[in-house]
Image (cartoon, helix red, strand yellow):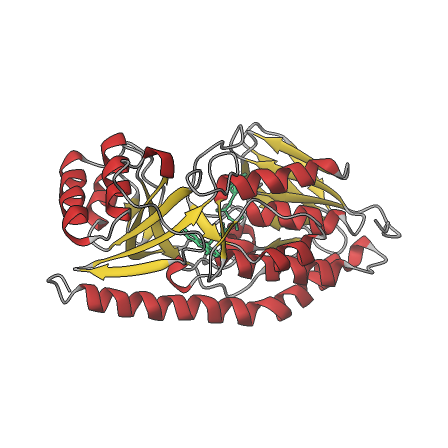
Amino acid sequence: MTRPPYAANCVVAGGSLVGLAAAIALSGLGISVTVLERTPSRAQAGGGGLGVDVALLQRVTGIGDEPPVVHGSDRDTTAWHLLQGWLEDHALRGGGITVHRGTQVTGVQPGDDRQPARVVTADGAEFPADLVIGADGARSTVRASVAPDDPDARYAGVLLWRTLVAEQALPDRVVRPRPGEPSREVYAGPYRLVTYLVPGAAGETGTGQRRLNLVWYDPEQGDLLRSRGLLAGQTIHGSLAPGDMPGPVRERLAAFAVANWPSPWREALALALADGTVFGTPIVHYKPRRLARGRVGLAGDAAHAASPMVGGGFREGLYDVAALARVMAGLTDSAAIPAALGRYQELRLGPAVRHVTVSERATAAYLARADVGPAR
Ligand SMILES: Cc1cc2nc3c(=O)[nH]c(=O)nc-3n(C[C@H](O)[C@H](O)[C@H](O)COP(=O)(O)OP(=O)(O)OC[C@H]3O[C@@H](n4cnc5c(N)ncnc54)[C@H](O)[C@@H]3O)c2cc1C
């Protein structure tokens, strides 16, 4: 680790994938990092799956070992909770990063070249910071300090029903996916199903110990979100936890799955719907006009929220982290941080806008196709 010739401290809001990757990369430059994460404890099994570019992750963070992944023939896949835990373990190992859990950021004063930024939390604590990274996800709080006139992501018109099902739980008669099984996508009626394998709950990757990851795109749940107070105007205020799916929706989806989705995914869905382990994630879009103000920079979904339909949300977040590390390397004075964040914005705003634009177009095309109606 190289020490910068000034004492720099950074507060990262959000201790998920991008926040922890940023913490590790900035700590590697000798910056002292405090991560503030709203959730009180680590998830042991929650969340869904995602594809991960292991080489990019290693390059950006400087970590030498691999997170638990299933090597599909098209890409490596993992579960969010496994990757988050792996990153948090690495963050805590080096000594330069402190993680405060159960700490919700409620506001940020961005500071300038003479004044530090200030991060305020729900318990009334204040954290002065030379640098603040807002990595608090698609429904970011920090974003309001960077883009006060455009702080909210917008509902994209699609809810994702998501679940992970252990291979062991499938009935014996059901043929398991082969090793190397690629990601698959299937369209039927207004719906899209995406499937791939991820490691077991403790990172197991052997056949019989993996989990089936299912993502069901559903464009018909705007009223449900509104009735639960999760959608007001275009703004999303939350997601549907496991068990929140109404009985009639569950019955309709279960019948549709049996009739339309391929084995073994339909059997996995039947189990998850019966167990109440399906949860709902609304897709949102956020196309940024800026990524930084004063001493605050946005990264990951806080900076640019897009649909997983176009893939690569985490990959874009890693590109953000690489750019942040590049502009922060070699600074000789904390007063230069706002200008460095200006360079970060120059590097990343264009790619972020392009990523979200591609997502908006793909989502519009999907919704137009979904409107056609009967099963295809
Ligand atoms: C179904 C699905 C599949 C996907 N597949 C892929 C894929 O294959 N490849 C890929 O690259 N990307 C994929 N993505 C996108 C990827 O998951 C996201 O881009 C990535 O997880 C974003 O990470 P993040 O750290 O920016 O945000 P998040 O993971 O949303 O984390 C935000 C963190 O901030 C915390 N937080 C929020 N508000 C506050 C606050 N006020 N104070 C403190 N903490 C706060 C939250 O608790 C959370 O821990 C997929 C996404 C979905 C939904």
Q: Residue furthest left?
A: 374
Pinpoint residue 240: horizontal percent, then vertical percent. Answer: 31, 39
The quarter of the picture where residue 336 lies is bottom right
Between 31 and 251, the residue placed more toward the observer is 251
- The residue at 31%/60% (across/down) is 185
On screen, residue 26 above or below 86: below
Compared with 100, 355 (above or below) is below
Residue 19 x %, y %:
60, 47
Q: Nearer the viewer, residue 50 or 99?
A: 50
Quadrant assignment, res 238: top left
74 w.r.t. 256: above or below: below
Q: Which of the two residues, 88 or 203, is positioned nearer the viewer here?
A: 203
Percent across and percent down for residue 230 are 30, 42
Numbered marks: total: 0
Residue at 64% over, 57% down = 321
Residue 227 in view (yes/no): yes
Vertical side of 97 occupied by 259: above or below: below
137 with respect to 134 (left or right): left
Q: Residue furthest right?
A: 5
**Residue 293 in sight in this render:** no
Residue 322 locus on image (x, y percent): 66, 60
Classify residue 311 by image quadrant. bottom left
| Residue at the (27%, 34%) spot, across then down | 244
Image quarter where the C terminus lies is bottom left
In the image, taking residue 47 as reference, residue 241 lies left or right, namely left
